[in-house]
Image (spheres, rainbow, N blue to C red):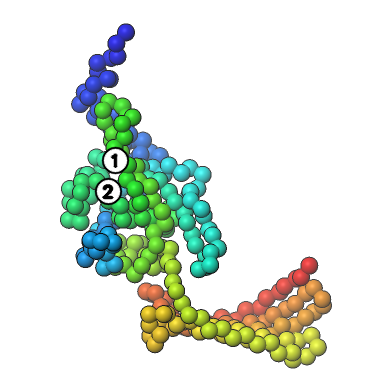
Amino acid sequence: MPRNVFFSQAVKSEQNLYEDLIVESLQIYGQDIYYVPRTLVNRDSILGEDPASKFDDAYLMEAYIENTDGFEGAGDLMSKFGLEIRDEATFIISRRVWERLVGKFSSNVTDPRPQEGDVIFLPMTNSFFEINYVEDDNPFFQLSNLPVYRMQCSLFEYAEEDFETGIESIDLKTGQSAYQVFMDVTVTGNNHFEVGENIHFNTTIYIQPAVDDFSDDVKSSAIFALDFEVNEQVTISLQYSRFNDNAPPMNADKMDESISTKFSWSF
């Protein structure tokens, strides 16, 4: 028996019904996200990069997170450059919603689909993800219609891009929540003094200037600790800490001080 003509052909009414069901499912089971398109300022035609790119629009929409058991990827790794966070996620959004919100009104869109390099902000985890690949065509779909975009993303690596979307939750959290990699030169000093038989005084000093700005971007910290050994296993420590940053993030103080008492047990 031949296939049903209403389901085997590209019937517009059936396509609309199928798409309506997909959109409704995304609204029920999805999460709120902000789609943040990247604005290219001076793109390098050879390397395909734009160090001066910026983000000045953000669009709220729903998306289904395909990873139900947490983020994919390699997770947290300790490399020779320090701690690297390699979280990945796959977001599914409606074509109709994206075209109605982003494709129709954004002046940053040069191609009528989500672009690799654009950013997704996930308020649920305060995380920024960069789009690595967009699956906008798939030969195996029903009714000759593919009503969604499937976007494979990795944790956004912040590189001092300007975020001026007008949404405070995005603009203020960019430098704090996005993954950043720095190269710093660190000068460290550590001294240990024996005050008494069971009393020790320890000092630790860090000086960390940025490689590209030794004079104006310097971080330093000093920790002074007085340790009292109660016995071979228990130690009580009185600690004073001071942290300085000549160029702190927005809404952060240049200096932070703290006094703490710590109890440690060795076994």
Q: Residue at x 43, y 63 (%)?
A: 179
Contact check, label 1 and label 2, Cβ < 8 Å: yes
Image x and y of residue 150, in percent: 34, 42
The reply to whether residue 130 is visible in this rendering is: yes
Image x and y of residue 251, in percent: 38, 74
Placement of the C terminus among the 4 image quadrants: bottom right
Q: Assess disc 1: are there few (<14), some (14-19) or many (≥20) residues with their C-alpha within 10 Å of its C-alpha.
A: some
Left or right: 239 in relation to 232: left
Choose the circle earlier in sequence order: 1 or 2.
2
Q: Is residue 137 above or below residue 122?
A: above
The amino acid sitting under disc 2 is Pro
- Residue 191 position by quadrant: bottom right
Left or right: 88 in relation to 11: right
The amino acid sitting under disc 1 is Asp
Q: Secondary structure at mark 1?
A: loop
**Residue tagged by mark 2?**
114
Placement of the N terminus among the 4 image quadrants: top left
Q: Residue at x 47, y 56 (%)?
A: 86
Count of marks placed on residues = 2
Residue at mark 1 to residue at mark 2: CA–CA distance: 9 Å
Give the farthest residue toward the top: 1
Q: Residue at x 79, y 85 (%)?
A: 198
- Residue 216 position by quadrant: bottom left
Q: Assess disc 2: are there few (<14), some (14-19) or many (≥20) residues with their C-alpha within 10 Å of its C-alpha.
A: many
Image x and y of residue 160, in percent: 34, 69
Q: Residue at x 33, y 29 (%)?
A: 140
Q: Is residue 129 above or below residue 201?
A: above
**Residue tagged by mark 1?**
136
Left or right: 266 in relation to 247: right
Image x and y of residue 84, in percent: 49, 62
